[in-house]
């Protein structure tokens, strides 16, 4: 009986993976580059199931307690009861949100590795970045390393676009480039989709237009996004998907330039079928 | 006819099952879609929190599954092809040589922490000294080309973090290996497997007894397809792999479940409020690394998302401790090794990580 259960487990998981793979929903849980690996594991599971099927008469080799079988059946149960859907903004705060220049952060940490977290707290990007707080810094202007920085090459290409439009494919590249060289893009028009994220550290007339990025699986998803500000930004509902059109501005924040979108207009859109950005 | 089926039932079931899967893959879209429609209609709306948790749980499970399967099959390969003498010949007798060798093995064998436990366990069964195996267990997830690359990319293309992480991790692994050599040299480390009805007196399932050479095959009725010794060995190893897969899998699932629950119901924001004091932050980040159980190939990206709130020290704690010790890994070890060994292993690694991160950085 238990030997048969083992066969069922192997084939059951294989069918679950296969249906995710065929329906394309696999990208809701793992990065698309894992597709090959998933296919291989389906094959391996079939092999294991077959071997167990051929050895059915010999029963289960080494005992596994009943709770063990219950636990291993959980993924199948979860899959049945609530099949994977895209993460929504309600979990964004739990997963970590970043809208600050990565280079600037790296710099800060290099300069002050021993710096206590208390003073780090002061440079928390959650402090609302507004022009009034700008601290003109003279000597500590971020000198971005020019050598082999792939984003530098993208600057002219992105600048050439009349309206900088973020798509699924270019999102990560464009986002990083604009974050690294905000001055270059000052005054450019920009259009992007994302969900509206707010937390208590942002001002009333600010929100983050964000997307989840996935590097491996949904468990490591984090939000990247641009701070969007404007007089009517306060009316935009949280957690809904919108398409933002605006102008890039830079604000000085903690001695670093940071791009902000000045909101011109927005319209609600339906969430894309595959809402993640894959690195 | 019945006789024919009985003789060839192995081949027949094989063809049937493969055919069924091929059908599903090629023309079974409709069937699979209706299946998923059926699932959709039967699914309960549990609210966004549970929905998110289910998604995260399945994502950890599906992402780790290939690596567990690779681990299990690698262990199978080792079982069939690597002889105990080979291990004895290739492992230096001097721990001063063998332990550093084990720390570098990860560069050749890029297994992440999900797949490493079955491999390490098999190597111990094959007679690899436990201190070497445990060094290997600790070092491989960190000293690993994929982990190194992902850390490099996650931290803004800088090598500082990579060096700090890899070297400290390797150092801790080697030190743990030596401590193991001092204290556990003569102690059996493997948990005895609960034996079953499977006729044991006759020496079947005998690969636990290190009797590979005189491994007489099962005197059972259905042995006609075991004509070649090699084939029979494969069949036996694979049959055992089913057990190993489910045995490892149950701990892995449990770990994934707890990690997903933590991610949805507690969240990273809880940790950020502790970032005022560095010591506390370090402890919290190590605890987080333990609870989240993210694959070592990807955890650097998550750590990078903390840069805004944390100093370097807690981040390093997260990056070094996570691959060596995490919930699902510990649960998998509980299924394979004896409790005192695991307690020593767990305690030692935790203390060493704390000390080294505090003293070095």
Image (cartoon, rainbow, N blue to C red):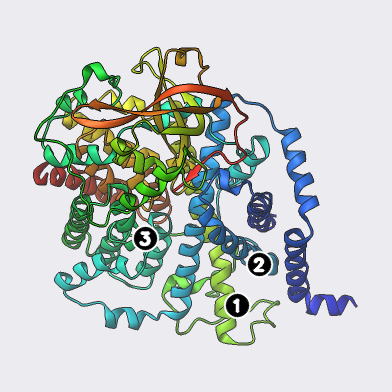
Examine the rendering and report whether any part of residue B287 can be seen.
no
Q: Chain of mark 1?
A: B
Q: Residue at x 57, y 23 (%)?
A: A267
Q: Residue at x 45, y 63 (%)?
A: B71
Q: In the image shown, does A11 or B93 lie closer to the viewer?
A: A11
Q: Is residue A29 above or below residue A21?
A: above
Quarter the N terminus of chain A occupies: bottom right
Q: Chain of mark 3?
A: B
Residue B310 quadrant: top left
Residue B273 quadrant: top left
- Residue beneath label 1, please? B218
**Residue A228 in picture, x, y percent from top left:** 41, 24
- Residue beneath label 2, please? A58
Q: Are marks 2 and 1 in contact (CB under 8 Å)?
A: yes
Q: In the image shown, does B257 or A264 lie closer to the viewer?
A: A264
Badge 3: how crowded within 10 Å, few (<14), some, or many (20+)?
some
- Residue beneath label 3, please? B190
**Residue A60 in picture, x, y percent from top left:** 61, 60
Say if labels 2 and 1 share a chain.
Answer: no
The CA span between labels 2 and 1 is 10 Å
Q: Secondary structure at mark 1?
A: loop
Q: Is residue B324 left or right of residue A205?
A: left
**Residue A34 in picture, x, y percent from top left:** 52, 56
Q: In the image shown, does B205 or A244 lie closer to the viewer?
A: A244
The CA span between labels 2 and 3 is 25 Å
């Amino acid at each position: 009986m238990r030997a048969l259960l083992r066969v069922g487990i192997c084939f059951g998981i294989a069918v679950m993976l296969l249906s995710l793979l065929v329906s394309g929903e696999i990208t809701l849980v793992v990065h698309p580059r894992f597709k090959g690996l998933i296919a291989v594991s389906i094959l391996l599971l079939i092999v294991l199931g077959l071997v167990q099927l051929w050895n059915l008469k010999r029963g289960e080799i080494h005992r596994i307690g009943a709770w063990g079988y219950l636990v291993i059946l959980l993924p199948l149960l979860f899959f049945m009861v609530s099949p994977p859907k895209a993460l929504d903004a309600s979990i964004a705060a739990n997963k970590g949100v970043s809208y600050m220049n990565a280079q600037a952060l790296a710099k800060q940490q290099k300069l002050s590795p021993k710096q206590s977290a208390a003073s780090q707290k002061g440079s928390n990007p959650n402090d609302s970045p507004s022009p009034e707080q700008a601290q003109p810094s003279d000597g500590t202007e971020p000198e971005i390393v020019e050598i082999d920085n792939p984003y530098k090459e993208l600057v002219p290409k992105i600048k050439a676009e009349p309206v900088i439009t973020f798509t699924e494919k270019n999102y990560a590249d464009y986002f990083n480039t604009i974050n690294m060289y905000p001055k270059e893009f000052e005054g450019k028009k920009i259009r992007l989709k994302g969900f509206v994220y707010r937390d208590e550290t942002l001002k009333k007339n600010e929100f983050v237009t964000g997307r989840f990025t996935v590097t491996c699986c949904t468990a490591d998803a984090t939000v990247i996004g641009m701070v969007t500000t404007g007089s009517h930004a306060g009316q935009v509902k949280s957690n809904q998907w919108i398409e933002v059109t605006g102008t890039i501005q830079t604000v000085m924040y903690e001695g670093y330039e940071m791009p902000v979108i000045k909101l011109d207009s927005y319209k609600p859109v339906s969430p894309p079928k595959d809402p993640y950005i894959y690195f | 006819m019945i006789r024919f089926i009985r003789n060839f039932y192995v081949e027949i079931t094989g063809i049937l099952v493969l055919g069924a899967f091929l059908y599903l893959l090629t023309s079974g879209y409709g069937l699979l879609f209706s299946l998923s429609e059926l699932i959709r209609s039967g699914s309960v709306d549990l609210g966004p929190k549970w929905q998110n948790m289910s998604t995260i749980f399945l994502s950890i499970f599906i992402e780790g599954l290939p690596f567990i399967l690779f681990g299990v099959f690698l262990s199978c390969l080792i079982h069939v092809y690597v002889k105990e003498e080979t291990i004895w010949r290739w492992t230096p007798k001097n721990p001063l040589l063998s332990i550093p060798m084990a720390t570098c093995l990860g560069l050749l064998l890029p297994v992440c922490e999900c797949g490493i436990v079955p491999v390490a366990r098999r190597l111990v069964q094959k007679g690899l000294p436990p201190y070497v195996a445990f060094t290997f267990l600790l070092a491989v997830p960190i000293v690993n080309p994929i982990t190194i690359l992902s850390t490099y990319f996650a931290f803004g293309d800088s090598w500082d973090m990579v060096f700090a992480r890899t070297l400290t991790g390797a150092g801790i692994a080697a030190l743990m290996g030596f401590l193991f050599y001092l204290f556990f040299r003569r102690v059996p480390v493997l948990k005895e497997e609960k034996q079953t009805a499977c006729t044991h007196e006759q020496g079947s399932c005998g690969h636990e007894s290190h009797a590979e050479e005189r491994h007489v095959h099962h005197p059972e009725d259905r042995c006609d397809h075991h004509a070649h010794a090699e084939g029979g060995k494969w069949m036996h190893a694979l049959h055992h792999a089913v057990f190993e897969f489910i045995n490892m899998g149950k701990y892995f699932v449990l770990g994934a479940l707890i990690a997903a629950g933590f991610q949805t119901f507690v969240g990273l924001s809880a940790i950020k409020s502790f970032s005022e004091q560095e010591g506390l932050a370090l402890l919290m980040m190590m605890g987080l690394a333990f609870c989240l159980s993210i694959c070592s190939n990807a955890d650097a990206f998550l750590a990078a998302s903390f840069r805004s709130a944390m100093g370097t020290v807690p981040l390093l704690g997260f990056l070094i401790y996570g691959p060596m010790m995490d919930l699902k890994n510990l649960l998998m070890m509980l299924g394979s090794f004896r409790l005192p060994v695991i307690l020593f292993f767990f305690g030692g690694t935790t203390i060493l990580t704390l000390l080294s991160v505090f003293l070095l950085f």
